[in-house]
Amino acid sequence: MTTPSPSPSGLALGPADLRGLARLGFGAVEGVTDLVEQMHLTIGERALPLGAAVEGRTRGITGFVYRTIRGTTKLASHGVDAGLKLAERVAPTARSSPKREAFVAAINGLCGDHLEATANPLAIPMSFRVDGRSLALDASQLKTALPEAKGRIAVLVHGLCMNDLQWRREGHHHGQMLASDLGYTVVDLHYNSGLPVATNGARFAAQLDTLVAQWPVPVDELVIVGHSMGGLVARSACLEADEHGFAWRRKLTRLVCLGTPHRGALLEKGGHRIDQLLGLSPYVAPFARLGKTRSAGITDLRHGSLQPLPEDVAVYLMAATTAERPEGLKHAVVGDGLVTLASAWGEHRDPALALAVPRSRKALLTGANHWDLLSRPEAAEMLRRWLG
């Protein structure tokens, strides 16, 4: 059976959501306590302005105070968690909403690896969805959920901190266009974007193999459209499928990447440099911990992917630039605001590391940002041309 579709109402967090947020909140209190204690220890040791961070715990009465704070925080955390877990059993399950889905997706993008490692109820399990409804990967249930399923499948893979509902932007939805204009049956991948790209790629590959095997009608063709990080997840899934011999790989004919940081993203590269600078002094090194709490999914965007493109698949690359014309410093450095043209097109100073994609399979939107790739008419037209 499919799950209820998202309600159009507001945020409407349920007890499970509140329990997950409470866990994050108490964890943040412990983290800040550790940070303050490390600064206290560094000052007490009279460390040099530059050098390695001072490690360890404070001692004596000071150490007792910090241990008391941690113990009290843990007791409060266990109490609140138990109370909200009880509320989950008695309170009716609230229908989700686009606002809640966006909120949870953003948290997963920021710290999704931590959510999964701690079994936090906010962690998003990977699934295929249609109109926000999860699909059961069973032949009979797929036939019921998709009575008009066709042999041409298009899978849409969203980006970092996003979810499948956000493919709709400014009244346009690439998936609906592919279905109405080109005859594809479109399914969306919903996943925890804070996990490592390789982890999501492996799970995507395995679940896609089951989806294709259980599809209600024979599959003639499979295409994947990935936005931003979604393109990296799709590339990783192809490598995983090649390694394990998944059957869906033989059906894949085309892969479209929209604003995918094949050579890394600006913000993560900048964040890594800031971490390095903070680490130069033991007095500010504790603050580097705050930056390093970002998810593995985000840190994977520092370098993008150096893995080869899938063989026997037509790969198409679409980029955007906020500049009105493809020239000048703004175009070269800012790109679409998150990803430069060179990264989205997989260009590299070393020809051996550049993506071997012909110019005819590349497109550029000018005067557009990273999210305009989801809604601009030019982007839709290129998808029609490439996938038609």
Image (cartoon, rainbow, N blue to C red):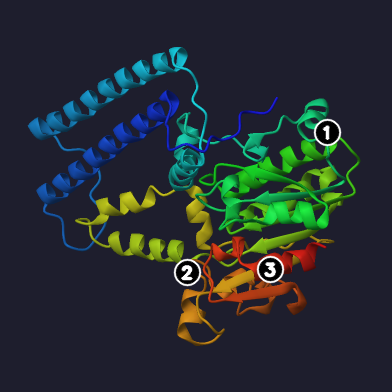
Query: Is residue 259 something that shows in the picture?
Result: no
Q: Quadrant of the N terminus?
A: top right
Q: Which one is in front, 245 or 87?
A: 87
Residue 299, percent across and down?
48, 55
Q: Is residue 345 above or below residue 124?
A: below
Q: Quadrant of the C terminus?
A: bottom right
User: Residue at the location (47% across, 38% down)?
Assistant: 100
Residue 123, percent across and down?
50, 35
Secondary structure under the numbered disc 2 in the rendered image: loop
Sequence-wise, which precedes: disc 2 or disc 1?
A: 1
- The residue carrying mark 1 is 214
Q: Residues within 10 Å of mark 1 (few under 14, many from 20)?
A: some
Is residue 58 found left or right of 86 in the rendered image? left
Q: Which mark, by number, is residue 297?
A: none
How many marks on residues? 3
Q: Amino acid at mark 1?
A: Gln
Q: How much space separates mark 3 and mark 1, taking CA atoms?
A: 30 Å
Residue 257, percent across and down?
67, 62
Secondary structure under the numbered disc 3 in the rendered image: strand
Q: Is residue 106 above or below residue 260?
A: above
In the figure, residue 321 lies in which quadrant? bottom right
Q: Which mark, by number, is residue 317?
A: 3
The answer to whether the residue labelled 2 contacts the one labelled 1, judged by CB atoms less than 8 Å apart, is no
Is residue 342 found left or right of 314 in the rendered image? left
User: Residue at the location (26% across, 22% down)?
Assistant: 76
Secondary structure under the numbered disc 1 in the rendered image: helix
Residue 55, percent across and down?
25, 45
- The residue carrying mark 2 is 337
Sequence-wise, which precedes: disc 3 or disc 2?
A: 3
Q: Residues within 10 Å of mark 3 (few under 14, many from 20)?
A: many
User: Residue at the location (62% across, 38% down)?
Assistant: 132
